[in-house]
Image: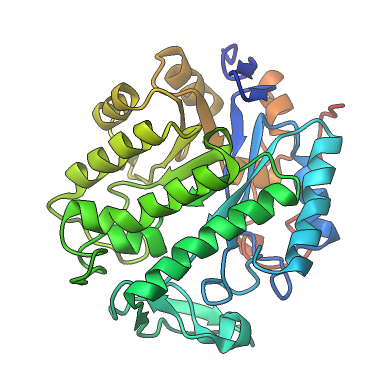
Amino acid sequence: MQTKKLLSPLVTDTLTLNNRVVMAPMSRRRAVNGVPGPSTQLYFAQRASAGLIITDNTAVAPNGIGYLQVPGIYNEEQKAAWKKVADAVHAKGGKIFMQLVHAGRIGHPLNNEGNAPIVAPSAVQADGVIRIPGDVHVPLPVPEALSTAGAKAMVEAHIQAAISAIEAGFDGVEIHGAHGFLPEQFLNPHTNRRTDEYGGSIENRSRFLLEIMEGVVAAIGKERTGVRLSPFAYINDLPAYDEEAATYTYIIDALQKLDILYIHLSALVTNGRSSISDAFLQDVRNRFSNLLILAGGHTAASAEALLQNNLVDLVAFGKPFIANPDLVERFRHNAELAVPNADTFYQGGDTGYIDYPAVYQFN
């Protein structure tokens, strides 16, 4: 199997990575009271041979946690715990970005700190259920619509979280603008029925995400700032809409002007078909001159093909990293990959988290 480019270093003016394998952000939900513990330090350190690690989606505010036991970065205890994670990865020679999220309407007050009500651009309930304390699954509630001032406060929460991540020693941050969470809820007219400056036109619906990006760039620097987008994926009860392609074109052009470090596209693969077409990928490539990451069901071989065709600069792997802490070395040796246990993806403590063995050592 040819993995020459996948395993080669990536060197830019501001960032050097040992290879082009990215550990995709995954929600492993092991943070009691939103604080990552010693097992999280070990979990990421075990996987530090990735060119770049992107953390679990990490809540920027007490009302945006979403799922049970998701970590946060909105108080000093969380920040101190995350510093130990960054230090553990750096001690192994790795690079790590923190993914920042506000889950918006995908959550429940009983999962939020202080039972804070869930909020969204508009009071549009999502279809589906969510796990709450006591291991009970309940319907997603109707969210409270953010006021204009409330929306601006959520922008500021993202900016402050980015500052905290850098102060905790992270190499950068990734804003989660994907998967049906708050920024994408603003983008989609189904969940954004507002009539203020954050609703209506493509420009207005994009304003929330782009104000976050502008604010984070100003606060921590464009070279430390990335964003995740999932066009055409329809995750968390977000339907297709007429202006979707035009909306993403507008956003990507704006991100090019901001000159951020990277765009991370998350594709959903259904029946072997990716939600992100090669044509769309090529269009993003043409519009955005900095780093492009793609995630979504890739193997070492398919990743190498993408890189050889110059469609992307880095490829992100999620589930393969769960059961293969030494994934990069397994790619290097063309070794068989272990299969993760889906029952422990989102719960289970240390089981299914830090107990998958490495076949190959690094450092």
Q: Is residue 228 left or right of residue 125?
A: right
Q: Is residue 154 left or right of residue 24?
A: left
Image x and y of residue 151, in percent: 38, 69
Name the residue nearer the viewer: 74 or 270: 74
From what the image shows, is residue 21 above or below residue 317? above
In which quarter of the view is residue 183 placed? bottom left
The answer to whether residue 184 is above or below residue 131 is above
Quarter of the picture holding the N terminus: top right
Please tell me how many numbered marks the rendered image carries. Answer: 0
Quadrant of the drawing holding the C terminus:
top right
Q: Position of residue 279 (x, y in %)?
A: 24, 27
Q: Residue at x 56, y 70 (%)?
A: 61
Decide which of 149, 158 is in the foreground and name it.
Answer: 149
Q: In percent of the image, x 32 and y 38: which residue is there?
A: 254
Q: Residue at x 29, y 81 (%)?
A: 123
In the picture as drawn, the residue positioned furthest to the left comes out as 242
As drawn, is 1 to the left or to the right of 309? right
Left or right: where 63 falls relative to 81: left
Residue 13 percent coordinates (x, y): 60, 18
Residue 234 seen in the current view: no
- The quadrant where residue 76 appears: bottom right
Image height of 159 relative to 271, above or below: below
Residue 249 % position (x, y): 24, 38
- Give the colour scheme shown: rainbow
The answer, for residue 29, to whether it is visible in the render is: yes
Towards the viewer: 219 or 243: 219
Q: Please name whichever residue, 224 or 296, is drawn nearer the observer in this view of the structure.
A: 224
